Image (cartoon, helix red, strand yellow):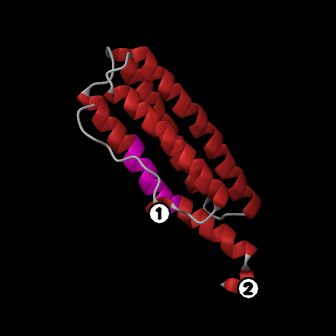
Amino acid sequence: MTYDLNITFDDNLVTGNETIDTQHKELIDRIQNFVTACQNGDSKVKAIKMLDYLDEYTDFHFKEEEKLQEKSGYPEREKHYEKHEEFKKTIQELYEYLQEYEGPTDRFSELVQKNVIDWLFGHIKTYDRSVAKFIFMKQNPDRC
């Protein structure tokens, strides 16, 4: 990867739900590790290994978020679940891309930026914040 990607968990990504925010920090750390492996010109094997590491945590996190939504009776669960499925498909496409090429290319970097980083940050700021707000309001009806 030839350009610098800003992949940090900051106040713009805070949802206010401790469980979700803690998991997002871990998820973003894993994305950073994956991108670093790609930027360093590490081998295809290492890039795939870091993608495995990211994929594994993404799966865990999405399941946890979906459990929270179900438990709280979040009305937009189905739509949110579809977004998670969309992201999982993206991860699979990155696997296919890495298999097809010798390793991460500039085009691959662009895909990671658009389909992983931009997508995730946008998802957190909209969908996940909405879930956190719903849960907060349900737990604190007197504060609404």
Numbered disc 1: secondary structure: helix
The x, y position of residue 28, in whole percent, is 49, 44
Report, in whole angstroms, how far the alpha carbon at label 2 lies from the one at label 1: 26 Å
Q: Indicate yes or no whether the magenta region holds residue 121.
A: yes
| 115 with respect to 131 (left or right) | left
Residue at horizontal 35 percent and vertical 16 percent from the top? 100
- Viewer-proximal residue among 26 and 67: 26
Residue at horizontal 50 percent and vertical 21 percent from the top? 49
The x, y position of residue 140, in whole percent, is 73, 78
Q: Amino acid at mark 1?
A: Asp
| 83 with respect to 143 (left or right) | left
- Mark 1 crowd level (few <14, some 14–19, many ≥20, 10 Å Cα): few
| 2 with respect to 13 (left or right) | left
User: From the image, which quarter does the C terminus lie in?
Assistant: bottom right
Principal SS element in the magenta part? helix
Quadrant in the picture for residue 70: bottom right
- Viewer-proximal residue among 10 and 74: 10
How many labels were placed on the picture? 2
Q: Is residue 97 above or below residue 56?
A: above
Q: Is residue 142 above or below residue 70?
A: below
Q: Which mark is residue 26?
A: none
Q: Indicate yes or no whether the magenta region holds residue 6.
A: no
Residue at horizontal 45 percent and vertical 49 percent from the top? 120
Q: Nearer the viewer, mark 2 or mark 1?
A: 1
Q: Which mark is residue 142?
A: 2
**Residue bearing the label numbered 1:** 11
Give the magenta range.
116-127
User: From the image, which quarter does the N terminus lie in?
Assistant: top left
Numbered disc 2: secondary structure: helix
